[in-house]
Each structure stands twice: as C-alpha cells, then as structure tokens.
Image: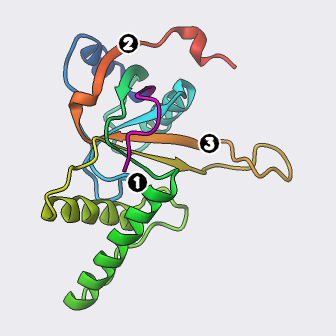
Amino acid sequence: MHRLASSFVLGYHGCDRQVGERLLKGAPFKPSNNEYDWLGPGVYFWEANPRRGLEFAREASKRTPSSIREPFVVGAVIELGLCLDLTTSSGVGWMRIAYESLAEVSLAAGVPLSTNSSDQLRRNLDCAVVRMLHSILADRRLSAPDTIKGVFTEGAPAYPGAGFLEKTHIQIAVCNPDCIKGVFRVPDDQFRR
C-alpha cells in the first residue's frame, strides 16, 4: 500500500437518478458489500470514465431485480489516501500474502476456496482475498487501506485482433468515506464520444 500516486482523482459512480440527485445534495454514499465485489466492500467508482459509469448503470437497470430505473452518473473528487493499488507490484504482493493465508485457513477448515465466475464479472475469490487482507491488517494493527484500485479487462476486442478490450477500466473502491471530498454533476458533453 502506498501514498505514491497523485493525491486526488476524479471518479464516476453509476446509479439511479433519484439516488444521484440525493448524493448531489449531500447524502452519503452507500457502500457495496456483496461477496462478489471485485475490490471488497466499499463505494465503487470508475476512474476518469463517466461513460463507462453510465454504461454500467444502463446494464444494471436491465437486470432483475434492479434498483436503477433511470440510469445516472455522479462525479466525485476522491483522495486516494493509503491506497492498495493493484496496478503496482507492492499491491499485488499484498494480495498474494492474503491469498496464501486464506488458502491455509480454508484447507485447515476443510472448506473450499471461493471462485471467480468464468466471465470474471463476479469475483467471489478476489473479494474473499481482499477481506482476508483487511483481517490481516487489523490483526497486526496496521492501517487499513482508504481506497483500493485495480485495472479490469472486460468486454470484446476493440477491433479485430486487438489486445485492447472495449470495457477495460480502472475501478476504485473507497473504503474510507472521508476520502470522498466532493460530489459534482457530470456535464452532458462528458458522455459524447
């Protein structure tokens, strides 16, 4: 974990319009705490990618059940603080340590490890590893991460033979809500190509 990157980033949160309007008026964000959340518990943002945030909200609105009736995006200024950055060797190293600990505990308990879905959209194993890392840090009385950041490759190739995928993005889970320094309405021109 580190404080080596620039201190502030812009993140975009896909949600329902009513929720977004409440957030713009100062309501707190509700952290996600699903067993399949890629980066563990936290408030999820798409870094520097308002269009992907809107795509997510549109996709989520089509699922049954869905709390999103009118897809919407709010922007936020996020201070990364103490960041578990999974784009760095150090961040991945922390995850490896947590995985090894989780594997030992699972083996000793005779319980199989969680798995990620084959399409990598539901990341039960990754979430369990992040949760284990939180436990390890707490047991050692080390600081918990304020934010967790990771790159996710997702979607179809951007063009024939491409190594780039259409939905690749950087996602940030804010674990410490004090790191959300401000919320803003995203201008319409940010959604145009």
Identify the residue under disc 2.
184
Circle number at residue 167 = 3
How far from the left and from the top, in percent, is residue 47?
49, 32
Q: Secondary structure at mark 2?
A: strand
Residue contact between numbered discs 2 and 3, judged by CB atoms under 8 Å: no
Mark before the other along the chain sequence, 1 or 2: 1
* 1 and 2 marks in contact (CB < 8 Å): no
Question: Which quadrant of the view contains residue 78?
Answer: top left
* Secondary structure state at the residue bearing disc 3: loop
For the point 46% across and 30% down, the residue is 6
Pointer 1 or 3: first along the chain: 1
Mark 3: few/some/many CA within 10 Å (<14, 14-19, 20+): some
Amino acid at the residue labelled 3:
Lys
Q: Check disc 1 and report the residue beneath it.
A: 38
Rendered image quadrant of residue 108? bottom left
Q: Which residues are magenta?
A: 1-11
Query: Compared with residue 188, is residue 16 higher up or lower down, i.e. above or below?
Result: below
Left or right of 132, for residue 121: right
Amino acid type of the residue that numbered disc 1 sits on in the rendered structure = Trp
Q: Vertically, is 21 above or below 164?
A: above
Which of the marked residues, 2 or 3, is nearer the chain's N terminus? Answer: 3
Residue positioned 29% across, 59% down in the render = 35
Q: How many marks?
A: 3
Indicate the quadrant where residue 42 lies: top left
Image quarter in which the C terminus is found: top right
In the rendered structure, the answer to whether residue 82 lies left or right of residue 134 reads: right
Q: Amino acid at mark 2?
A: Phe
| 2 or 3: mark nearer the eye | 2
x and y percent of residue 103 in the render? 33, 81
Q: Nearer the viewer, residue 112 or 172?
A: 172
